[in-house]
Amino acid sequence: MGNIGPLRYNKSERKVISVHPVAQIKTFCLLLADEIYHTFQYLRHRRGVLPGEIFHQLFAMGYRSAPLVCLITFLIGITISLTSAAQLRQFGADIYLADLIGLAMIKELVPLMVGIMLAGKIGASITAEIGTMKVMDELDALTTMGIVPVKFLMTPRLIAITLAVPLLVALADFVGIAGGVLVAKIALGTPAPIFLREVMSVVTLNDFLTGLWKTLVFGWAVVIAAGFKAFTIEAGAESVGKATTEAVVLSISLIIGLDCVFALVLY
């Protein structure tokens, strides 16, 4: 498997990439192949990555993202509960709010919202950081020292997002359902134990695992898209901001597209 680094993306190639979508897709696939290869190679030999970098990335992606994820999913849970409760009350089906919130949050809303938040926070950060290194010729310096830039920079981030996503999903599921519990208690008078019992009777382990796998795929898409935009960045400080914006747009587009594919397969 070839070494995709700054030497591969010379100036003439960047012009072709920016003009021809086919060349962009080819470069994206090559970069993806190298990332997969180097990640599995690192897991086997534990070499080529800065010691402690995985923990550092896990801290940034997991711990620092948790407050924002909890806040947004809690508000989404409240919003969906309020709009749904108004309709269910007309038919005397108040208890089914628990079924709706449990399945909607765990299988659809949490994966989608966590993926979009990761795109805006983590994707932008990765592109800006690696893109700045590219503009400052730091990637060329890594290659000169015999270090594979893709392995050195992307492998810790891919492993970290894999470890961070389950924690974020568990938190988001709990907080999102808590928003539903709050609305059910205030608006419908449904006690929390009854609401939670109904959720547990409807939501299965398979539903949770489905949401978890979807969010993992979304997280990988964010990191890979951000790395692609960073490694193919053009020279100049202005291009860093442009690439960061494009990375967020690409990440969200991939998330929406992948969510449609999941919907076709699962439903």
Image: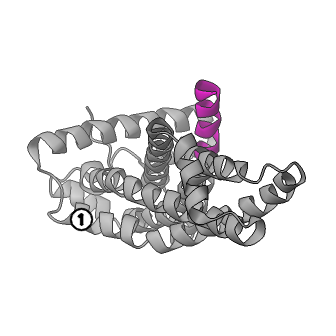
Quarter of the picture containing the C terminus is: top right
Residue shown at the point (65%, 35%) measured from the top left? 260
Residue at 64 percent of width and 44 percent of height: 256
Nearest to the observer: residue 135 or residue 31: 31
From the image, tell me which residue sits under label 1. Answer: 55
264 up-or-down from 234: above or below: above
Depth check, front residue: 47 or 7: 47
Residue 75 pos. (x, y %): 66, 69
Residue 234 appears in the rendering: no
Is the image coloured rainbow, by chain, by secondary structure, or in one colour? Answer: one colour
Which residue sits at x=17%, y=66%?
52
Residue 266 falls inside the magenta stretch: yes
**Image: 178 above or below 109:** below
Q: Using the rendered image of the protein, determine whether residue 34 is visible from the camera's viewpoint.
A: yes
Characterize the local packing of mark 1: few (<14), some (14-19) or many (20 or more) Cα atoms within 10 angstroms: some
The type of residue carrying mark 1 is Phe
Q: Position of residue 198 (x, y in %)?
A: 59, 49
The secondary structure that most of the magenta stretch takes on is helix
What segment is highlighted magenta in the picture? Answer: 254-267
Q: 116 or 69: which is nearer to us?
A: 69
Quarter of the N terminus within the rendering: top left
Up-down relation of residue 75 to residue 214 (above or below):
below
Which quadrant of the view contains residue 131?
bottom left
Q: Is residue 242 left or right of residue 168?
A: right
